[in-house]
Structure formats: C-alpha cells, structure tokens
Image: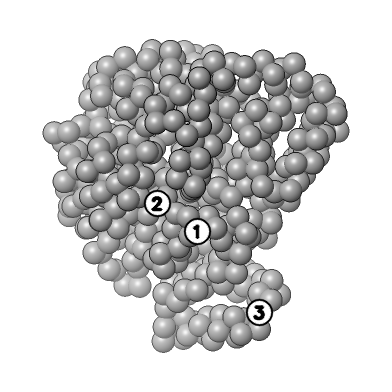
Amino acid sequence: MYQANANAAADFLNDEEIRKTLQYAEENKSNRTLVREILAKAAEEKGLTHREASVLLACDLKEENRELLALAKKIKQDFYGNRIVLFAPLYLSNYCINGCTYCPYHSKNKSIPRRKLSQEEIRQEVIALQDMGHKRLAIEAGEDPVNNPIEYILESIQTIYDVRHKNGAIRRVNVNIAATTVENYRKLHEAGIGTYILFQETYHAASYAKLHPTGPKSDYAYHTEAMDRAMAGGIDDVGLGVLFGLEKYRYEFAGLLMHAEHLEAVYGVGPHTISVPRVCPADDIDLAAFSDAIDDETFAKIVACIRIAVPYTGMIVSTRESQAFRERVLELGISQVSGGSRTSVGGYTEEVRPEDTAQFEVADTRGLDEVIRWLMEKEYVPSFCTACYREGRTGDRFMALCKAKQIQNCCLPNALLTLQEYLSDYASEDTKRIGETLIERNFTDITNPKVLAKVQEELAQIRDGSGRDFRF
C-alpha cells in the first residue's frame, strides 16, 4: 500500500500506486476540465501531487500544453529569477565493482583504463578548475570499498577545500557517491559537504534488477532508501535524479515525484535539487539496448512538469545535453548547469580533452568563459554563489525562504557579487564587457535601497581588489 511517510522503499515508491497513476493519467489526458483544474492549482505555485502532475505530462491538448509551458516559465522566474548557478564535476576515480549495464565504469569493462587520483593530482585538478573560475564542485567516484573507501573521499574533500590558488577557492563541494551508511553520511556532513546527490537511475524495481545485475548497487531498497539515511546522518540537502531512457519515462516521472513527496512528508524538506540526465553514448555502452530513449520535445515537457510539480527545487542539466537543448530548458525550469566540464578522471589538467576514462560523451564542449558569455547574452545572471550553505541556510531553513519566494532577496545580490569576482579575475575582455553591463541592468531588481547601496559598495571593492567573498 502506498504510504508517502513509510520507511520502506516498497511502500513510499509503491509499484501499484505508480501503475494506477499512469492509468489515471492515460484515461484523463484529454479531459480538458480536469487538466484545467490542475493547471489552476499549479498556478498557485505550491506544487502538485504525483498523480496531478502525471496527468499534465500525459496531456495531449494543444492549448493546455502551451499554457503548461508558459506556467513553467513563470514559476521558474518567480522562484529563481534569471539566475543560473554554475558548477563542475570532478571525477576522482573510475574504479567500480558494480555491473551497471548503462555505465562504462562497470566492473566487466576491460577497455577503459582504471585511474584514481592522488591527493596531489586532486590539488592540480582543483587549481585548474579555480583558474577557470569555478567555486562549486560535484565530486564523483565509482563504488569500490578498496580503491575508493570513505576515508579517501573525506581526505579528497579536505584537499579540495584547502587549495588556495591566486584568488581561487572552492567554496562548496557537493558529493555524488554510492549509497552508504548513516555513519558515513555523518562523516560527510562533518566534512562540510553541500548537497548529497544520488541518482536512482530507475524507479522500476524489476528493470533496476536487470540493469544492476551485480555489485552492492543491485540492492534496490538500500539504494532507494539512501536519502533517508543521509538525512539521519545530518545532511540537510539531498539531490534526486533518474537516468531517463532506462525505463518508460512516465513511470520514472511518477516515481521521482513520489520520492520527493516522501522526503517532504517525513522530513518536511523536499529535494534540494533534481537532476534530469538522459542515457547517452559512452565506452562499451550500446545505446540500441535502451529502447525507452526520449526525444527533445518529450524531455522538455518533463522538465516543465517537474518545475510545476516541485516549484521550490533546483533543477540541473549537465553537459550531456547540447547547447541548443540546454538553452531551451533553461527557461522551462533549469536553474543549475555545469560548464567547461571534463568527465574523465584527471581531465582538467590535460590540454586536450581526454576520452579514455570518460563516464559519458560531452555534448556541450564549450569552455566556462563561453558558457558564461552565452548565458549573459540570453539575459541570464551566471552565479557562483555558495552563500546559503556557508550561512547555514540549508534544509528547512532554505526551503522556508524558497517557498515564500524570499530567497531571491539574498540570491540576486550574491549572484551579482560572485559574477563580478569572475569578471575581475578570469573573464575574457568581451565577457567582462557584457557582464559589467548586465550587472548594472540588474540593479533595478534590487528593491531595497540599503541592499543596493551595499551591493554597489562591495562590487567596487571587488573591482579595485580591496575585498571579495561578500555574501548576503
């Protein structure tokens, strides 16, 4: 029986409830009265249930679908404005003992060189990332208790935080590693991580078993209940995600929202982020084996429906997606993007992009400066802000501000200040020129005169080199 506040994955991600939801959505996809009722509820910007959102995803009414997309744009603007947070992944090790059939790191792949970064190599990678201008990283590692034990992850986090190069500093380390114990999550929390990210890959238990034939990740319940253990270990902010294309997308969508509902019901805090990766080419991976791949139109609608259903969550799209598609989904709900990414172990210190240890092919290969300039030309404000994490605005404290749409009072000033740091320290001349003008234009959106005066004062200090790392 479906119970959002249950402890067991089989209950809060109940297969029968998902199937009933999909049947209900299919039966009502052309029910204009119901669809309009759901859209009216969504317009209140307080979210939707998994069943209501599933009806919108299935909806085949042209006019209502246009309204759906327009509403997603409005909700994105109301909660997150024009700010887009930048981050980069940092791959520490591709040693892995799992048998995941969609990932080139799987244990039976003998064609991919195995590599694990030393602490000095991590330091060099971080310097390279700092020299690009990054302030926020997401560390990645395969699951291997011998090569990648929790002690290695903790030491690596400390190394990253300790690196100071010129004006560079990594101010937030998010962690994307395998499901682990409450004790280990507590250690990660004590190490000062930001968000703990774990993709479910698929919520379909039977498909999950086929896709994960060997290794500790094959335990569906243990993997699915990881966020509960992370919360028990003191981690306030967790990030969900599925790998779209492994199973029917409507099933995954319903499961994803049910997982969000579970976190909200039990902890009063939904997911801090939701990532939306798709299956893409990689070493030793045959895309033809995945028949549930989705086209761009469907994927864009998924992004819009997630934004409508979970308006407060940050949404992430990576360099798996092309520039053109990333541009499309930015306005529909995406609030975080990676830039200048290398998905190989040790990739940032290589002049030529290495492919031999890459987890997946990068579709958007532009450098960070190009990504920053592109965002600003589209009137977005690139942000390197990590203030909420460092000021203790995490978990329920962040969500209370976000749901009340008050977080923007901090976010826009912080975005402008961190953008100015980038412009002063790393930007090309063209990017700097565009950025300085963009900052000026955004002053009109800071309605508190005292806040605006302080922002302008601190921007001047960043420009003349007398101060930095300001935050509201």
Q: Using the numbered discs, state the Cα–Cα distance from disc 3 to disc 1 in whole angstroms.
A: 21 Å
Indicate which disc, 3 or 1, sits on the residue closer to the N terminus: 1
Disc with the residue nearer the chain's start (2 vs 3): 2
**Nearest to the observer: residue 306 or residue 440:** 306
Judge depth for marks 3 and 1 and give the one in front. Answer: 1
- How far apart marks 2 and 3 lie (CA) works out to 30 Å
* Disc 3 crowd, CA 10 A, few/some/many (<14, 14-19, 20+): few
How many numbered marks appear?
3
The amino acid type, in three-letter code, at marker 2 is Asp
Quarter of the rendering containing residue 465? bottom left
Q: Position of residue 401 (x, y in %)?
A: 56, 61
| Image location of residue 330, percent across then percent down | 63, 47
Name the amino acid, label 3: Asn
Q: Residue at x 81, y 21 (%)?
A: 30
Where 111 falls versus 48 (above or below)?
above
Amino acid type at circle 1 is Phe
- Label 1 SS: helix
- Percent of width and height locating residue 59: 76, 26
Q: Nearer the viewer, residue 251 or 462?
A: 251
Q: Are marks 1 and 2 in contact (CB under 8 Å)?
A: yes
In the rendered image, which residue does mark 1 sit on?
398
Q: Which mark is residue 448?
A: 3
Q: Residue at x 49, y 48 (%)?
A: 269
Spatial CA distance of label 1 from label 2 is: 10 Å
Q: Position of residue 328 (x, y in %)?
A: 67, 42
In the displayed structure, 141 sits above or below 432; it is: above
Give the labeled residue for mark 2. 236
